[in-house]
Image: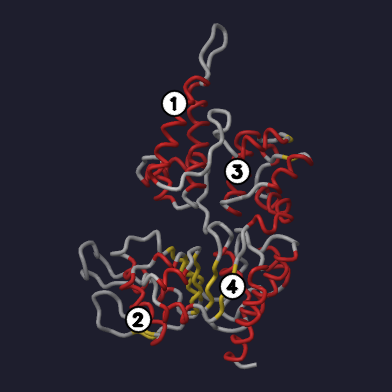
């Protein structure tokens, strides 16, 4: 079947089945192994949705068509992109990922296409961009909906011509890269508002896959928890009784797989080696519950600040105080609160460190240092 017929078939199949597709979780990529075991080790779960997702990955991987992954933040879109690369003919070549929303607008062109020494202030040496570095392989453009409009024009030209020009150079370079993009935004609305180019959407989305939320495949949660715990020492792994597992499967998981991974890490830090019940799980799902009544997730920066102020005011009466013969480990108490608030901020910010740092009124580098201190890992959307 030629590529045109194949991609047309996939598009029709996706539009019928897209709403039921499964998600993925993060794990190590096995390069160059096109077999069922490798794919099942990458895409975790046995639900019907996850099984269909693996089948779709195998189908899409057969061609070089551009793929756009749509779905909520934290659902595992980068892992789907990795799996498509790993199952295809380019598996032995480079896989490169770039978050278009996390790079300052003035640097995105250099990141994608590279630059020559002296081409702008701070360009002290030649830099190879992601397109060149991925030549022969796959380039994953995450959060493509956040790309500046002028950069969308340049990206479209590259995709059409299959050539790039480094910043500060006039030399045209041929490239052979498969592009997989992802977004959690409604690009249809963005196109209608003039914020995203329709022609670029059609170029990037020859095949469009919908990656669903974790809440739509809750039967995979036990397997995902085991997966996240597999590299943990035995004495920090938590167990969950039946009632606790039911509560986990009833939770809405607004942060999707990323939120579940944070939950597992939080449980191991605060309750390592224990068997957790419903009350323990409820507390871990809402770390501030003991200090303030549960409230809705703030929808604006003003609401976030108001929520933080309310939290600080309500926390004071419940804080532990020293008593005769009962000293307080102040350092540990502060670290526990700090860790909990880092997790909450990351969940609210969909894992974007710069946004989480803003919510915590910290510098981005300071938050990264604290995440390293507590062993909190940055998740891909």
Q: Is residue 149 above or below residue 160?
A: above
Q: Which of marks 4 and 3 is in front?
A: 4
Classify mark 2: residues with Cα within 10 Å, few (<14), some (14-19) or many (20+).
many
Spatial CA distance of label 1 from label 3 is 28 Å
Q: Do the numbered discs 4 and 3 sit on residues whose CB atoms are within 8 Å? A: no
Q: Do the numbered discs 2 and 1 sit on residues whose CB atoms are within 8 Å? A: no
Find residue 71 and report its horizontal and vertical position in percent: 56, 64
Q: Nearer the viewer, mark 4 or mark 2?
A: 4
Taking the spot 57% from the left edge, 51% from the top edge, the residue there is 254
Q: In this view, does 261 lie above or below 125?
A: above
Q: According to the image, label 3 marks what residue?
A: 265
Secondary structure, mark 3, is: helix
Q: Which of marks 1 and 4 is in front?
A: 1
Q: In the figure, residue 119 lies in which quadrant? A: bottom left
Secondary structure, mark 1, is: helix
Spatial CA distance of label 1 from label 4 is 45 Å
Q: According to the image, label 2 marks what residue?
A: 164
Q: According to the image, label 4 marks what residue?
A: 209
Q: Nearer the viewer, residue 243 or 267?
A: 243
* Of pointers 1 and 4, the one earlier in the residue sequence: 4
* Of pointers 1 and 3, the one earlier in the residue sequence: 3
Spatial CA distance of label 4 from label 2 is 27 Å
Taking the spot 58% from the left edge, 75% from the top edge, the residue there is 91
In screen coordinates, is 132 left or right of 20?
left
Q: According to the image, label 1 marks what residue?
A: 313
* Of pointers 2 and 1, the one earlier in the residue sequence: 2
* Of pointers 4 and 2, the one earlier in the residue sequence: 2
């Amino acid at each position: 079947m030629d590529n045109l017929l194949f991609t047309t078939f996939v598009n029709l199949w996706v539009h019928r089945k897209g709403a039921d597709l499964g998600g993925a979780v993060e794990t190590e990529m096995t390069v160059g192994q096109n077999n069922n075991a490798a794919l099942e080790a990458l895409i975790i779960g046995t639900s019907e949705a996850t099984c269909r997702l693996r089948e779709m990955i195998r189908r899409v991987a057969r061609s070089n068509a551009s793929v756009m992954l749509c779905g909520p933040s934290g659902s595992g879109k980068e892992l789907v992109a990795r799996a498509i690369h790993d199952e295809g003919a380019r598996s032995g070549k480079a896989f490169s990922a770039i978050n278009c929303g996390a790079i300052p607008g003035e640097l995105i062109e250099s990141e994608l296409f590279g630059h020559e020494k002296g081409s702008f202030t701070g360009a002290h040496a030649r830099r190879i961009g992601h397109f060149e570095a991925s030549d022969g392989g796959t380039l994953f453009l995450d959060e493509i909906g956040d790309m500046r409009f002028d950069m969308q024009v340049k990206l479209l030209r590259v995709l059409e011509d299959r050539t790039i020009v480094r910043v500060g150079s006039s030399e045209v370079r041929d490239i052979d890269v498969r592009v997989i993009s992802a977004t959690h935004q409604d690009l249809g609305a963005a196109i209608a508002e003039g914020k995203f180019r329709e022609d670029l959407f059609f170029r990037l989305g020859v095949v469009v896959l919908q990656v669903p939320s974790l809440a739509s495949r809750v039967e995979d949660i036990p397997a995902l928890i085991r997966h996240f715990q597999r590299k943990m020492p035995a004495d920090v792994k938590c167990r969950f009784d039946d009632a606790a597992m039911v509560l986990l499967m009833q939770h809405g998981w607004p942060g999707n797989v990323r939120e579940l991974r944070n939950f597992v890490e939080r449980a191991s830090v605060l309750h390592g080696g224990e068997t957790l019940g419903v009350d323990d799980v409820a507390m871990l799902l809402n770390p501030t519950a003991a200090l303030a009544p549960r409230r809705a997730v703030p929808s604006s920066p003003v609401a976030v600040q108001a929520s933080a102020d309310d939290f600080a005011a309500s926390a004071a009466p419940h804080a532990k105080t020293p008593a005769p013969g009962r000293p307080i480990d102040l350092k540990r108490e502060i670290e526990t609160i700090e860790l909990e608030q880092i997790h909450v901020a990351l969940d609210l910010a969909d894992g974007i460190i710069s946004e989480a740092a803003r919510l915590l009124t910290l510098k981005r580098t300071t938050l990264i240092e604290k995440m390293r201190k507590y062993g909190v890992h940055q998740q891909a959307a």
